[in-house]
Amino acid sequence: MPNSTSTLSSIYRIRVAVPVPVYDCFDYMLSAEQYQQAEVGARVAVSFGRQNLVGIIVEKLSNDTPIDPRFKLKAISELLDEQAILDAKILSLLTWSAQYYQFPIGEVFQSALPAFLRQGKPYNLLARIWKVLDLNAEAKVTRSEKQQNAYKILKLHPSGTTENILNLAGIETATLKALEKKIIIECVLENQDFRPQSVTLAQMPLTPNQDQKKAIQHILKAQNKYQAFLLDGLTGSGKTEVYLQVMQEVLKQGKQVLVLVPEIGLTPQTISRFQSRFHGHIVLLHSGLNDSKRLQAWQSAQTGKASIILGTRSAIYTPLPNLGLIILDEEHDLSFKQQEGFRYHARDVAMYRAHLHSCPIILGSATPSIESYALVSSGKMTNLELNQRAGVALMPKIHLIDLKIAQKQNGMSQTLIDEIQKRLDKKEQVLVFLNRRGYAPVLICESCAWQAKCPHCDANFTVHRQPYQHLHCHHCGSIHRMPEHCPQCKHTELKSIGMGTAKVEEHLQQLFPKFDVIRVDRDSTSRIGSWQKIYDKIQKSEPIILLGTQMLAKGHHFPYVTLVAILDIDSGLLSVDFRATERTAQLIIQVAGRAGRGEHKGEVYLQTLRPDHPLLNTLIHKDYRHFAHQTLKERQAALLPPFRYAVLIRCESKSQEQNQEFLQQHAQVLKHGSENLIDIWGPIPAPMERKAGRYQAHMVLLSVDRARLHFYIRAWWQNMLHQKPSTMKLTLDIDPQELS
């Protein structure tokens, strides 16, 4: 690059990460005064092409740094922040993530900011403070239990309290607005106080058993340094108590704790456990929050005010000035892997973040991932086992029901129906698991065998009956009316084949009319607060039937469930994905683990057409750990991940021929340029070849050398992006978790 000229030497410049699909940062000019004010990690408004965008300053360049005279620099539009909002460690984490996952750096930086900050809005928004106006309004709220509860809590705060804290206490914004209409309370806007708050114990810790005590001691020895721990504990073995007692010591030092859970549905019970143990500032960060609440929670974490930060995968990129511990609960869960856009894995990012902050990280699970067992085997992670359930609870016994010979009613064996009746008669709770929502997976004509297929995908429509009868494709999202007759033969007898949760709910209500059936799936929990209401009902010792999908399998504590019924798990035993058996084993153990967590012994009945399958018999006669170590050996022999590192290239266009030709051409380029260090599988059609009217093809790259794999594909991938037709979509997935 040529040396700068004397006229250019006085130009002040910054390097900015701009949210565009380009892999580099861009230089912008600014005045000498702006240069003095600008801080790395602050936001800046810039012009990019015809767009006005918000970027992040990643570097302040010296004014004598050489400039290529061929390029004309633009001036920034505005400095948006007086101080950095992203600190040096989070900038390092984001930069590493962009490089490792080979994703445009500006878009990675943008993903770490709340929506209001991405839009360029001011950092210091005012907080909504709710205060009591009428101290003698008890008579005005007698008809509403929610309003009574909110009023009582607000009276405990004469100076008012924030909406965020009230929401954490279970008080909905709608309830506050109802009281405001009655002129009982008011909402005022005040400047937020971001001073850190001390944490005290609200409840004494439980006495740990020997396994818990050993785990706590091991982790506390690693305070103030990086060490990764796999907390491998049976379902119900008290992993949360280990978390809480380790957190107590970290919080004593004035440090922050970041806790990641896989689903929003897990946050109510987790926040409840934390609030009952600690008096302190706890914030939630997940997609269910509106933009204003998310920004307030983010600011509380970023300033150090919040001591405990509980969130889903995206919370891993929240700036935390005093981070002292990271906990990743249910670490095996696929939800920690982002499947669209910036395809990071929160588990792997969390481990790198713990390394940057020199703090311990705990990965907890009853069914750890094969990757985590591999890290333990290689000495990169310390394994801590919890081998007994907390209290008097025992592990449930699993029984197999052979569907080939069993008497059945509406897809349920008579044995299972009898067992459900027994439990309900004893006033116990039953969990029925089926990982298929909707009413039925197939609509067929009884005359000509026509099936209702999605016109855009290689998939059948699923029949739904709520809120009205319709056909829904769960792959592309298209919705069609229910046909009145067969479009081929005009026959009017159309039959729903198979079972979804809605159809099973109907059958259970017919079989057990005296008992409540509570369905938990995406359809039934889509409304805000619906999951919390369901969860509260389950916690009461009343006989109910709980029916749902894998939402119910993720670490929930249901103390009164004594019977788990798994209706159909066979599809997971037949998948072409090499991870399918691992996912199926985890699902079985996790669902089974919801039984017998209280005083009564639990049992599991699993219906299957393949009772002799090796996986099922390993889980019944041995355990998940035996299965995992056996699977680890099989993966090593076959040189599958984690013993080779994988990259998945997805190609999508209107022509499968175009996909295959394009991928084949670039596969040859990579093969010749990588010294045969990369094994290339494909290109082949994706398991679902056509989705949303477009054809999908895959190509998998494998290598035992991760560094060289990333080195060779970096320039090759960007060259592919430059050469692809405008109608083609390409995505690159580092360390893919699914091959669909």
Image (cartoon, helix red, strand yellow):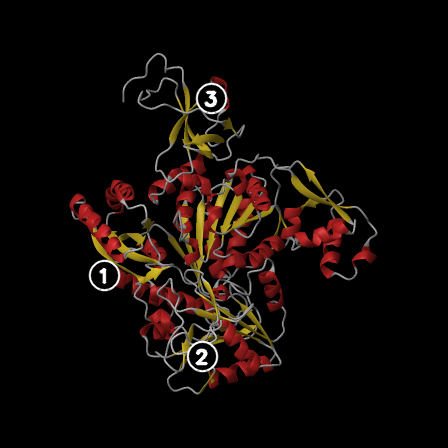
Instruction: Give, as a three-letter code, the residue at label 2.
Output: Lys
Give me the C-alpha separation between circle 2 and circle 1.
44 Å
Q: Which residue position holds label 1?
A: 638
Query: First in sequence: mark 1 or mark 3?
Result: 3
Seen at 48% across and 25% down, the residue is 38
Q: Is residue 42 above or below residue 724?
A: above
Task: Please give left or right for residue 164 compared with residue 185 in the image.
Answer: left
Q: Are marks 2 and 1 in contact (CB under 8 Å)?
A: no
Q: Nearer the viewer, mark 1 or mark 3?
A: 3
- Checking the image for residue 495, the label placed there is 2
Q: Secondary structure at mark 2?
A: strand
Viewport quadrant of the N terminus: top left
Position of residue 41 measured from the top left corner of the image (x, y, whole percent): 47, 32
Would residue 324 be visible to someone looking at this image?
Answer: yes
Viewport quadrant of the C terminus: bottom left
Instruction: Give, as a three-letter code, the residue at label 1.
Output: Ala
- Checking the image for residue 359, the label placed there is none
Position of residue 534 measured from the top left corner of the image (x, y, whole percent): 60, 65
Query: First in sequence: mark 2 or mark 1?
Result: 2
Would residue 254 be visible to someone looking at this image?
Answer: no
Task: Please give left or right for residue 196 compared with residue 105 in the image.
Answer: right
Q: Which residue position holds label 3?
A: 35
Q: Secondary structure at mark 1?
A: helix
Position of residue 673 measured from the top left corner of the image (x, y, whole percent): 17, 43
Q: Residues within 10 Å of mark 3 (few under 14, many from 20)?
A: some
Task: Please give left or right for residue 113 compared with residue 646 in the image.
Answer: right
